[in-house]
Amino acid sequence: MIDCVHVPLPLVATQGSDMAAARAPIDPLQRCISELSTCPICLEEFQNAKSLPCFHTFCLQCLKDYWKDKRGGQRVSCPICREPFNIPSGGLDSLRGNFYVQNLIEISGASTDSSEGIPCDDHPDKRLELYCLNCELTICRECQAASHRQHDSQEVAVVAEEFAISLEEATKPVLLRIEEFQTAVEQHETGDWQFHVAAKAADVAAKQHGEKIKNTVDGQVGGLLNELREIKTEEEKETKSRKVALELAISEMKSFISSSLELRTKGSPCDVINKANDLRAQASQLLETYVISVDQVAPVLTFVPMNIDELTRGGQNLVGRLRQLSGPGKSDTDAD
């Protein structure tokens, strides 16, 4: 048996209100669950949900129909964001399954019938059907007659729905934050591709400029290209690190969403009352902790050729130097 504890109550009606009548399900919650569990290709509930590297999710069969002429190893683009990727060598069946979506579908289809209620500690043959607004405590009707007669009380189902509504409002900004982080992951992957393009351009420019003075600077060209490779390697590590941090944040927020949905769809009214404040506080903590930082932008790399007049200056690399253009909040630097 689950013990009920004192919990501050959101705005609810008093004992005499018509809200004691049965209320309709929370439409925004059901709509949110439906949107998250619907395949964007067939517009039906996901069947064997599979995630692409860009995090967009589709039914396995929908992907097979969409790329029916493609085989493992071939390059295709996401039907939504058009981000390219290679089909795994094992085919589309070996794509990573989206267990978050699968759990969401299971939660949405689970029974939430709690009509029998929870026995009262003081009157085991009675059920906790009321919530005392004065004592902030769930009680049975015999408790109400015995010691809460002068207090305002409300049906547990009505109070639980009020808590569920307030919890849903706390959850919505977390869902939006997840979308922001998923967008940030996509932007980082795009920035990484642009960085490689810029690095390749710098590589070509360095070689072309080195050819002009090849007889004297072959060694320096090699040194410069080694330096470029080191910068590329370091930037790849930083890009992966930033991506891992973003994905970790998304994972934690998705875990919160899953716990919140499970409470609202499977939990008893007392469960909702007992845990709603903690989950709202957790939602606020997630929003404070995970914020997109302006310094999470990949730097820009260009090749700066050496001026011919500088060739006679001692200690200079005769080919040129590399310059990294950093993101917002960072200063540009010349690689030594």
Image (cartoon, rainbow, N blue to C red):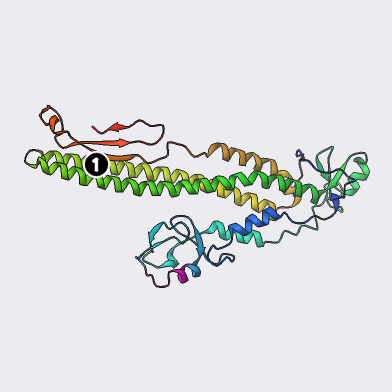
| Image vertical order of residue 68 relative to residue 3, above or below | below
From the image, which quarter does the C terminus lie in?
A: top left
Query: Which structural element holds mark 1?
Result: helix
Q: Quadrant of residue 206?
A: top left
Q: Is 164 placed left or right of 177 in the picture?
A: right
The part of the chain drawn in magenta is 63-71
Neighbour tally class for label 1: few under 14, some 14-19, many 20 plus, Cα within 10 Å: many
| Image vertical order of residue 309 relative to residue 191, above or below | above
The residue wearing badge 1 is: 228
Task: Give whichever of 322, 226 is nearer the camera.
Answer: 322
Q: In which quarter of the image is residue 89?
A: bottom left
Q: In which quarter of the image is residue 112?
A: bottom right
Task: Give whichever of 161, 125 is nearer the camera.
Answer: 161
Task: Give whichever of 83, 88 is nearer the camera.
Answer: 83
Residue depicted at 87% across the width and 50% down the height: 18
Check if residue 35 falls in the magenta segment. Answer: no
Percent coordinates x, y for residue 202 in the rendering: 24, 43
| Image vertical order of residue 219 relative to residue 88, above or below | above
Percent coordinates x, y for residue 122 in the rendering: 85, 46
Considering every residue shown, the one lying at the far left of the view is 215
Q: Is 328 placed left or right of 229 in the picture?
A: right
Percent coordinates x, y for residue 325 in the rendering: 33, 36
Residue depicted at 55% across the width and 67% down the height: 42
Q: What residue type is labelled 1?
A: Leu
Q: Is 240 placed left or right of 229 in the picture?
A: right
